[in-house]
Image (cartoon, helix red, strand yellow):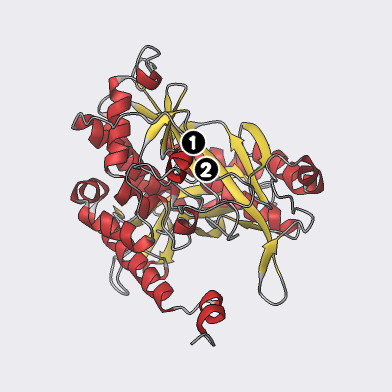
Amino acid sequence: MSLYQDTITRLQAQGIHSILVQFCDIHGVAKGKLVPLSNLQEWVEQGAGFAGPSIWGTGLPRFGTRSEYYARVQMASLQRLPYMPGVAHAVADGFAGGQPLDTCSRQLLQAAIERIKARGWTLWVGIEPEFFLLRQGADGTWQVGDTYDQLDKPSYDLKAIHRNQAFLDEMRSTLTELGFELQQIDHEDACGQYEINYKFDDALAAADRYMLFKLTAHAVAQKHGLVFSAMAKPLAHAPGSGLHFHLSITDAQGKAVFADPSGPLGLSAIGHQFAAGLLDHADALSALCAPTVNSYKRLALSHSASGTTWSPVWKAYGDNNRTCLLRAVAGRLEWRLPDASCNVYAATAATLLAGLDGVERTLRAPVPCDEDLYERFASADAMPSRLPRDLFDALSALEKDAVLRGMLGASFCEQFLQLKHQEWDQYQQHVSAWELARYADGF
């Protein structure tokens, strides 16, 4: 019996009849279709077919042999979806004309990983998903899903945990069944905001897992009459949702490459060089890690309704310092720039490549920050340089960063920049309720 038939037989014994073939578009949104399990060999070797131009960011033409996008199933990813009876989930890579698609962000990350594999290294990433539970009213307005969630300082609110136990417990049981090793669930700094943490993994598996996390959260939230939102900052006067990356590297012997208990901040020379690369490319990385107009509402100097903001505005790093863009903790690096709306594959790839550039060029990181940068800012003292203030500035920085674009690949960057400039132009032409309220009858 072939490997394909063995897999089909095993899944059929679990009641599986279909595969949800899932890939990721350039915006980081899961896309796909349902296909019969019985044709597994075709989905693995050829792929499930899609009209290429119908998918954001493929760059594929409207006709010809390369107009069709084929999502090739990765067999190791097949597993039963608890919330879709009879269906198994499968991660897929994008192909066109029989060749890997150079605008496929998942393969972008795989290519970046190959660069450190040549050193015998493995990148481990712990992803911390923050998100909001919202409802949309009949008039189209958005509000916090839990109307009782109104504390001035809602962090770690147990009453909200109790009120939303049905959603949270179904998330717990479903994620556990999908192989997530959960670590904690808490109410975050904003009303309606939560964080679910699970164990780190190698970079590709971590990115795949986050995509599955979002699919699951959307499905479970809908079941409970809620909307799972990965928008960076849906509430004007509250903290936004980050997607912090905890980064560490091990060598071929399993030794931690970044850690040195006797070194500054507990980091090795390579750890500091990697940090220097992240800070050196931070402006360009903003475009990929904070990729929406709304992202820069999170990355803003503003007072939070909760009295606390961890917004990583300044390009600095320090020992367990959450007011910095980069935090050194326990011999690893916490990269605090990404938000929950990013394409996790592209953001991880760009982060890895930027850090690796710092190692290859033996860059020196700035002097570590040992103070609260928000208190320093309030005192009007000189500050480290800031991240871009809006998406346009971030896109401009990516355009100017030839090194990072060269490492990521021209095709992906071209598609990304084109679409994001369109997004910025549409935003610039939009007239908001704030503008009308301020200016309509003011002159």
Q: Which residue is mark 1?
A: 322
Q: Is residue 35 above or below residue 169?
A: below
Q: Is residue 267 left or right of residue 176?
A: left
The answer to which of 264 and 369 lies nearer the viewer is 369
Q: Residue 333's x, y, as percent?
A: 41, 30
80 and 278: which is toward the camera = 278
Rounded to the nearest whole Å, what is the CA distance between mark 2 and mark 1? 6 Å
**Three-letter amino acid code at disc 2?**
Trp
Task: Residue 97: name its quadrant.
Answer: bottom left
Amino acid residing under circle 1: Arg
| Secondary structure of residue under mark 2 | loop
Identify which residue is drawn at 23% across, 36% down.
357
Please say whether residue 17 is visible from this viewpoint. no
Q: Residue at the location (65% across, 40% down)?
A: 175
Verify CB contact (< 8 Å) between mark 2 and mark 1: yes
Q: Is residue 207 above or below residue 122?
A: below
Residue 40 horizontal side relative to residue 111, left or right: right
Where 59 falls versus 214 (above or below)?
below
Residue 149 percent across, percent down from the top left: 75, 53
Q: Is residue 421 above or below residue 401?
A: below
Residue 235 makes an appearance in the image: yes
At 33% from the left and 57% from the top, the residue drawn is 394
Disc 1 crowd rating (10 Å Cα; few below 14, some 14-19, many 20+) is some
Residue 301 pos. (x, y %): 47, 52
Q: Residue at x 40, y 19 (%)?
A: 266
The circle drawn on residue 310 is 2
Q: Residues within 10 Å of mark 2 (few under 14, many from 20)?
A: some
